[in-house]
């Protein structure tokens, strides 16, 4: 899997406090998702070697036919500052991922789980403006192989945690065609988002064509 997020440093066990337990944190994350989208209409779990289990919850379709897929488990541990010599087990950014697809594409849960496990498996810090490339279609027949992580807060409100833990942020994922991903790597996320906005691109359309980049 390709990416352009920074890598984490080596893990260790500094005694900075226990922080929230995994069950407590994930229960709070799921409660925030349910309060935003309603009860899940499906869920799947994926386990990767050397990593904790990642679940993907499905919500909807809603009145507009939108289906949302949200990860559960990525935020259980913070992502460390890649310049820090030691990874803090409490402090550091925490995130879950949300993908919105009109009509739904349940097979996308596999790609979401891979992306959500990347901090554990590959040592990445997933942040707004970065991209993740699966290297294959996000689901069978999809014109997209990668996603752009967008700014959080507009879809799901941040989940505050007891100090000193950072809040959990819910990052929307915006599917990109290979050409869009190449454009983003050269021109930056802002330039691609401007193109999408200029052309009124429906980023929730599972069959949309790539935006004009000339």
Image (cartoon, rainbow, N blue to C red):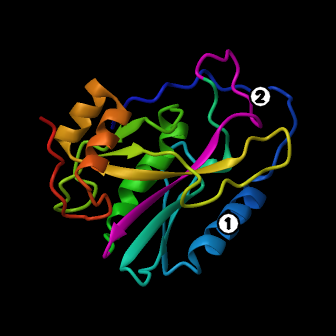
* Stretch of the chain drawn in magenta: 82-103
Select label 1 or label 2 by which is in front.
1
Give neighbour class at mark 2: few <14, some 14-19, many 20+ (Cα, 10 Å).
few
Residue 181 in the image, given as x and y percentages of width and height: 25, 37
1 to the left or right of 93:
left
* Image quadrant where one finds the N terminus: top left
Q: Quarter of the image for the C terminus: give it.
A: top left
Q: Per the image, is 136 magenta?
A: no
Please report whichever mark, 1 or 2, sits nearer to the chain's N-terminal start. Answer: 2
* Residue drawn at the location 72% of the way across and 65% of the way down: 27
User: Is residue 192 placed above or below 5 in the rendered structure?
Assistant: below
Measuring from the top left, give residue 185's x and y in whole percent: 29, 28
Using the numbered discs, state the Cα–Cα distance from disc 1 to disc 2 in whole angstroms.
Answer: 29 Å
Rendered position, 36 above or below 185? below
Q: Helix, strand, or loop for circle 1?
A: helix
Mark number displayed over residue 184: none
Residue 91 lies, with reference to residue 174, above or below; the image says above
Of residues 118 and 165, which is closer to you in this image?
165
- Which residue is drawn at the image coordinates 22% and 53% (left, top)? 137
Q: Is residue 164 rendered to the left or right of residue 121?
A: right
Query: In the depicted view, which residue is nearer to us: 82 or 51?
Result: 82
Residue at 70% x, 20% y is 86
Percent coordinates x, y for residue 17 in the rendering? 88, 36
- Which residue reaches farthest bottom? 63
156 to the left or right of 180 = right
At x 69% / y 60%, what residue is drawn? Answer: 26
Within 10 Å of disc 1 (Cα), the crowding (few <14, some 14-19, many 20+) is some
Quarter assignment of residue 157: bottom right
**Rendering quarter of residue 63:** bottom left
Residue designated by label 2:
13
């Amino acid at each position: 899997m390709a990416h352009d997020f920074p890598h984490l440093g080596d893990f260790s066990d500094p005694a900075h406090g226990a922080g929230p337990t995994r069950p407590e944190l994930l229960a709070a994350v799921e409660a925030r998702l349910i309060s935003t989208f309603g009860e899940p209409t499906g869920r799947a779990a994926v386990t990767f070697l050397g990593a904790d289990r990642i679940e993907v919850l499905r919500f909807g379709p809603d009145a507009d036919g939108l289906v949302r897929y949200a990860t559960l488990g990525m935020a259980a541990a913070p992502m460390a500052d890649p310049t820090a010599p030691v990874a803090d087990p409490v402090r550091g950014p925490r995130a879950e991922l949300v993908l919105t697809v009109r009509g739904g594409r349940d097979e996308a849960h596999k790609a979401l789980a891979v992306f959500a496990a990347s901090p554990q498996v590959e040592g990445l810090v997933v942040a707004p403006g970065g991209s993740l490339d699966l290297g294959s279609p996000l689901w069978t027949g999809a014109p997209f192989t990668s996603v752009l992580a967008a700014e959080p807060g507009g879809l799901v409100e941040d989940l505050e945690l007891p100090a000193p833990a950072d809040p959990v942020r819910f990052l929307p994922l915006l599917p990109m065609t290979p050409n869009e991903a190449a454009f983003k790597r050269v021109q930056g996320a802002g330039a691609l988002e401007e193109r999408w906005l200029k052309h009124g691109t429906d980023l929730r359309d599972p069959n949309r064509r790539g935006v004009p980049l000339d």
